[in-house]
Amino acid sequence: MLHRSHVLSFRNRIAKEMEMFGLQHIWDCIMQYETMLRSPYFPVLFSITVYLSFCLPFVVLDALSPRVPLIRRYKLQQKTNVSWTMIWSCLALSLYNHAVYIFPLSVLHWYWRPVNYPAMAPGVLRVIWDLAACLLLFDFQYFVWHLLHHKVPWLYRTFHKVHHKYTSTFALATEYSGAWETLSLGFFAAVNPMLLGVHPMTEMLFHMLNMWLSVEDHCGYDLPWATHRLVPFGLYGGAPHHDVHHQKFKSNYAPYFTHWDKLFGTLHSE
């Protein structure tokens, strides 16, 4: 029995090491830039770079869709076009919010709570679990915030109305919002990894995943490889789900998943 327990322990250790091997190599490469990661400028540069990188492919689609029927067929609202004026307006507001609000707060966060970067990477299964937990928690927080900012007229008028300037969604409209909306939703995204105690690598992956899903929600296209087509049983709403929200205003408040809207009777699947 003792020999068998040693064998099982050895197998478990080998399995764990194999699981960590791929992520450990990536984490080691990331840690070569530890000085940059510890810079007070890194969070805001990371945020704006990732966001604009995710928006860029959809901006190209928006530029081509009026002249390319193959692209236009996937557009959710085919009678609308995205103008360069709309693009520059959204881009300017996003850059302004990052410079005036997000950057000073990220510097304060850097000063008050220095990040500890462990030498070891997390396991693959742990990363998947933590990403799911962060995403589900953010989805719930956003749903409550969003529902309140539509049901309370003062909140909608004062804070959220800016984001609803465009009833036809497009990628760069993702961060077209005022200071309160930018900061409060950014607070949820920033505090959840801390509350759940995730690894710094997982935190980076969560921010990237969260930004991608948010941009995809606003992209204005129902593409064959979209996330909502990959997640079964209608559990994930995606771009069609959120585009209806921008048209109807009174439904589909959850950013990603559909269970909260189903539970509260606010799901609209047109």
Image: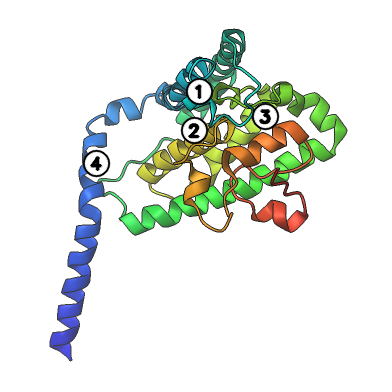
Label 4: state its secondary structure.
helix
The residue at 74%/28% (across/down) is 160
If you read the primary sequence from the N terminus, does the residue marked by circle 2 or circle 4 appear first?
4
Label 4, label 1: how far apart the Cα atoms are: 40 Å
Q: Residue 112 carries which label?
A: 2
The residue at 53%/32% (across/down) is 74
Disc 4 + disc 1, Cβ < 8 Å: no
Q: Name the residue under label 1.
A: 69
Q: Residue 83 carries which label?
A: none
Label 2, label 3: how far apart the Cα atoms are: 23 Å
Quarter assignment of residue 16: bottom left
Near-viewer residue (63 or 175): 63
Rendering coords of residue 232 (x, y %): 51, 56
Rendering coords of residue 24 (x, y %): 23, 47
If you read the primary sequence from the N terminus, does the residue marked by circle 1 or circle 3 appear first?
1
Near-viewer residue (1 or 240): 240
